[in-house]
């Protein structure tokens, strides 16, 4: 008896991506550059996050033609973003055969109260988180993979660092707690109790957790790995840099060999200018994508 | 105790470590040529074969691994690892390691939404073996000395070519260690029979 879309099949797909870099692309040409550089997957978008910031207005699922173009261009997995709570965008992407859906705060939320019930879908989902409560709620809804949110489209790593540190510190805390303390911790975090039990038993999150939102250089990517990320999403950091091919390759290498500092020095030489960053404090609260979702 | 290397460039490395530890093997992460020294077997894990290939090239691991294969070092490839081992890959002019006498096709069960799990009877190993297929490849045809160990829907999904074992699916994502035990037995056999106990590179 064949079983499709089981938890093992959906989470397993993310396990295969570990140690890798997932790159945002907006067309077939960029997708091919990403694949050639060694990306483990690409995220098909209409605009990268920094351009979404510039454009303003409502950011929605990409034109299906772009998604289709990227699906046809590469053999590595293709992910695409749906708005938070947008059941139909997610179903449309699933029907197109996208390999993973990102229920993403980079797009304008369609529902400010409810996230998608991701366990209902055959396609696996990745979701953003800033702390363990948010991570556990998304897993509870059926997310098969997590990524810390950071602050997308800024090229500023500070928020990504904050979030990966927070999640991992909270995981360590749960692992170290006695079982009779976990219900209170569940209440405080707003996390499902059973998930905290599972985290304590495993000694880690039950799904893969990548870092995202602000990675702009090979050293940034290596820093995320150093802080315990399973892999890295790079959005605007590659195709908004001066030399996308070189940046893409260097970020992949730095992610694999994140403790080899001589190598990181070598591959970081004369890379050209990274994307121009944004100081987080200059963003108004309404411009902070990480505040979207709960 | 046998020491088994797991290629740790990218992919499901942790899962293989867990299973190796359950079987009482010493598991080492292979990221550089240096790490290949003194291992009795090598596992090529699941992941993205295109990514792993690029990293194999960049860290000059391809040739040393091929040399160890010539010396009879047992190797086990799961999913992407099978693609790396295969002598021929459909749609590619050149193979990756090109050591196992099989023709492999990538993503041959479809995209992620077609990924599935199933229980397979594997006469050599046991019944009801859980097999997780994720964007899985399959073995289109095998050379004459290759033993076909498992089929799913008439497609070859597990095969052995002398000291090389390759499968389409991911035994490492389950709690069932019987397939890995089969490989560890291959490693034990090889350490007994091989004159050069420590493979050299």
Image (cartoon, coloured by chain):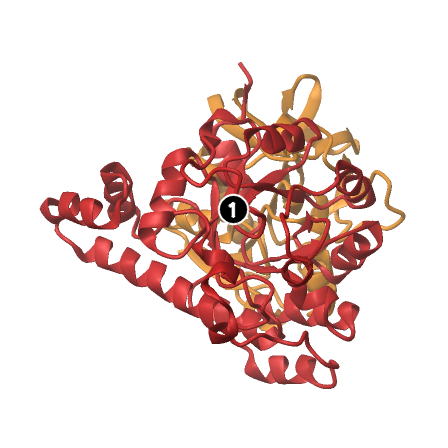
Chain colours: A red, B orange
Q: Residue at x 24, y 48 (%)?
A: A200
Name the residue nearer the viewer: A12 or A239.
Answer: A239
Name the residue nearer the viewer: B46 or A164.
Answer: A164
- Label 1: which secondary element: helix
Q: Quadrant of residue B159?
A: top right
Circle 1 marks a residue in which chain? Answer: A
Spot occupied by residue B9 in the image (x, y as percentages of width and height): 60, 60
Q: Quadrant of residue B146?
A: top right
Q: Residue at x 49, y 39 (%)?
A: A11
Q: Residue furthest left?
A: A180
Q: Residue at x 63, y 40 (%)?
A: B79
Spot occupied by residue A170 in the image (x, y as percentages of width and height): 28, 58
Name the residue nearer the viewer: A211 or B20.
Answer: A211
- Which residue is identified by label 1? A15
Spot occupied by residue B68 in the image (x, y as percentages of width and height): 66, 60
Q: 10 Å neighbourhood of mark 1: few (<14), some, or many (≥20)?
A: many
Looking at the picture, does residue A39 appear above or below residue A196?
A: below
Spot occupied by residue A293 in the image (x, y as percentages of width and height): 44, 47
């Amino acid at each position: 008896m064949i079983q499709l879309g089981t938890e093992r099949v959906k989470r397993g797909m993310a396990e295969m991506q570990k140690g890798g870099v997932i790159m945002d692309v907006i067309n077939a040409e960029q997708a091919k550059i990403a694949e050639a550089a060694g990306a483990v997957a690409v995220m098909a978008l209409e605009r990268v996050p920094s351009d979404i910031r510039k454009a303003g207005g409502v950011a929605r699922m990409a034109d299906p033609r772009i998604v289709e173009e990227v699906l046809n261009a590469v053999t590595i997995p293709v992910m695409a973003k749906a708005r938070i709570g947008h059941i139909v965008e997610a179903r449309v992407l699933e029907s197109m055969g996208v390999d993973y859906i990102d229920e993403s705060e980079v797009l304008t939320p369609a529902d400010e109260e409810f996230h998608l019930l991701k366990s209902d879908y055959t396609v696996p989902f990745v979701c953003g988180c800033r702390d363990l409560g948010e991570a556990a709620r998304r897993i509870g809804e059926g997310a098969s993979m997590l990524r810390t949110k950071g602050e997308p489209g800024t090229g500023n790593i500070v928020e990504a660092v904050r979030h990966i540190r927070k999640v991992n510190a909270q995981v360590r805390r749960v692992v170290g707690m006695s079982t009779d303390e976990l219900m209170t911790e569940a209440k405080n975090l707003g996390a499902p109790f059973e998930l905290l039990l599972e985290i304590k038993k495993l000694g880690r999150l039950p799904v893969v957790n990548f870092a995202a939102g602000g990675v702009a250089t090979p050293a940034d990517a290596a820093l995320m790995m150093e802080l315990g990320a399973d892999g890295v999403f790079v959005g605007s950091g590659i195709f908004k840099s001066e030399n996308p091919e070189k940046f893409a390759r260097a970020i992949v290498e730095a992610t694999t060999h994140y403790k080899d500092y001589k190598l990181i020095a070598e591959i970081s030489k004369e890379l050209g200018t990274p994307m121009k960053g944004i100081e987080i404090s200059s963003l108004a609260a309404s411009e902070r994508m990480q505040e979207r979702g709960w | 105790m046998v020491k088994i290397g797991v290629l740790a460039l990218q992919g499901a490395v942790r899962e293989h470590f867990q299973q190796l530890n359950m079987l009482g093997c010493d598991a080492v992460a292979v990221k550089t040529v240096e790490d290949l020294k003194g291992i009795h077997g090598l596992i090529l894990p699941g992941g993205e074969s295109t990514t792993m290939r690029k990293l194999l090239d960049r860290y000059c691991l391809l040739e040393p691994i091929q040399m160890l294969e010539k010396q009879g070092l047992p190797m086990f490839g799961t999913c992407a690892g099978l693609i790396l081992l295969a002598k021929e890959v459909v749609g590619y002019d050149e193979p990756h390691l090109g050591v196992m006498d099989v023709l492999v096709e990538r993503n041959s069960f479809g995209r992620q939404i077609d990924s599935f799990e199933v229980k397979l009877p594997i006469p050599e190993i046991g019944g009801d073996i859980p097999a997780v297929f994720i964007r899985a490849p399959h073995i289109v045809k095998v050379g004459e000395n290759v033993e076909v160990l498992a089929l799913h829907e008439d497609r070859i999904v597990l095969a052995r070519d002398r000291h090389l074992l390759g499968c389409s699916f991911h035994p490492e994502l389950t709690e069932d260690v019987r397939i890995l035990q089969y490989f560890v037995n291959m490693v034990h056999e090889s350490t007994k029979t091989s004159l050069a106990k420590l493979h050299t590179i």
